[in-house]
Amino acid sequence: MIKFPATSFKNSIYFRLLITYVIVIFPIILLGFYLYYWSYNNASEDISRATVTQLNYYLEDLNREVEWMELQQFDFIEDSELNKLAVTWEMMSSVELRSSLTYLLHRLTSFKNSSAYIKDINIHIGKNGKTISAVHSVLDLDMKHYEALQSKINYNRERLTYFDSSMHLIAAKYGGKKGQAPLFIIQIEFDLEKLSDSLKQMNLYTDSGAFLYSNTTDFRLMDSEQSKPILQSYLMQTKEAREKTSLLNHIGMRYHVDKASSDNLNLTVVTYLPEETVKRPLNFFYQWAWLFALASFIAIIVVSYFTYRFIHKPLLQFMQSFRRMEEGELDSTIEHDKKDEFGYLYTRFNQMLVKLKTLIDQDYKQKMMMQRSELKQLQSQINPHFLYNSFFILNSLAKTGDVDRIEQFTIMLGEYFRFITRNSDDLVPMSEETKHSRVYTEIQELRFSRRIQVQFDELPDEIASIKVPRLIIQPLIENAYEHSLENKDEDGRLRVTFTRENDDVFIRIEDNGEHLSDEKLEQLKLSLKHIDESSEMTGIINIHRRLVLTFGEASGLKLERSELGGLQVTIHIQLNQLEH
């Protein structure tokens, strides 16, 4: 079975050779396909240009018709006879009323006959409860229909109005008072059958179709029921597309779709044509091109197989061995009996693995020795100042005769020095490291109980058993006393807290010592990156380096300004690195 390397297949030698074969064998077939698609695209573009031009003419013609209707509608609104009839209907005599209605009906009929797209024209006079129709003469007013028209006038700001599954032009004449109902409403109803017939005239092929829809409403108009499923698919897939020409997938068929839109009318007209109709003249050439392509493909398979067997398979074995080496498997040598160039590479690779394993073992031992030596160095840095103060405290307690506190103090002092000087494992449970730090803090509390308040939180159970390097908390507490809290006459504060966030453990030691300037805080942060900093920071650097060696580069110390006002040192431990 053919296997490929874990690296990108596109960058492999096998892929490049395969591409070379394709370039050599397929120039003619590629040219043939190019000519085929070039012919298809030209035919599609020619059809699209002609169709889009026709669609734009159609919309322009429809817009001119609507503009003509709007002019006539406006003329009706200003008609003195109509205004007179709307205001004085009840006061007019039967002769005057008949004369006015005859005049208006004659005008309405002439208006209707002036455009093939008009189905009917209605003048609704709400005050008199009458409707004057070009088709039905004078009717009683349908109040429900009239109120719907009023609602459309109040809330619709577009030229065309859609309701009752039809398209209308609506205009109203209002009196002089604000908020008063209109004197009359003129409603022009479009003839959808004639509009549908006009869409059929744009079908250049027997299997093509067309439809019209509103960009802002649910109005849809088709040339035939056959276009309904195509319309639904189009609205679901490509309605929002800006391109005038696109391809539409519908029930396993592809359609060539052209559209044109009118911003004035907020309408879009669309025609569709099956893609097979466009490709039909090119099918014979297309079949021969595929036959030649199949023969060429078989030739490439044969050449590819022998290329894989004699070149790529040995190369893959070589790359997979490198991958195992990257994952740390330094004992996975390549077993082979080859006498060619790959045999030479395999032999040199096996020799390289042996040397690399030797170098890694040496480097690991050096790191472990460095870690142990740094711990011994830290252990040797027992602060004489702390030792002197401890004896002074012990002397003071002896003078007062406080035997119980002397006993307690000597026990704590003994535990402190036993932990700091013992030569056990470099890693200890977090509970022991915390206990040692708490003992040191309690010793200092005997000395500074009146000046310094200590908040030392309880160690959470879920991190008590974590193995950490020895002496990572107590030296930070000692640093806080020595450089910040000893100089405060009163109200000194020290806080030690423990938190865990998923796989991250944070131990924060903070105080309210001297206020740190931004420059000094930056110097303290830089001291963690440079070994040759001031001697007073040597302990912190030591702790940071041991944390990085134990838990990885993401762990270590972080220095920042404390909420208490002094320095906050955060020990960050990533547990996932420890488990790894």
Image (cartoon, rainbow, N blue to C red):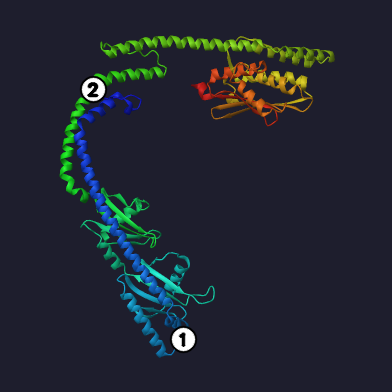
Crowding at dot 1, Cα within 10 Å, few <14 / some 14-19 / many 20+, comes out as: few
Question: Which of the pair 574/126 is nearer the observer?
Answer: 126
Q: Nearer the viewer, residue 88 or 47?
A: 47
Badge number at residue 307: 2
- x and y, in percent, of residue 484 in the image: 72, 23
Q: State the CA–CA distance, disc 2 to disc 1.
A: 102 Å
Of the numbered discs 2 and 1, the one sitting upstream in the chain is 1
Amino acid on which disc 1 is placed: Glu
The residue sitting at 58% across, 13% down in the picture is 426
**In contact (CB < 8 Å): disc 2 and disc 1:** no
Where residue 83 appears, x then y in whole percent?
Answer: 45, 81
**Numbered circle sitting on residue 90:** 1
Q: Compared to 133, does 218 lie above or below?
A: above
Q: Is residue 554 above or below residue 232?
A: above
Q: How many marks?
A: 2
Helix, strand or loop at label 2? It is helix
Decide if residue 134 is in sight here: no
| 391 left or right, relative to 312 | right
Question: Residue 537, percent across and down?
Answer: 65, 18
**Residue 431, x across and y down, in percent:** 62, 20
Which is closer to the viewer, label 2 or label 1?
2
> Quadrant location of residue 68?
bottom left
Could you tell me which quadrant the N terminus lies in? top left
Res 447 → quadrant: top right
Pick whichever, 414 or 128, lies toward us: 128
Residue under the image location 54 percent in, 76 percent down: 177
Q: Quadrant of residue 97?
A: bottom left
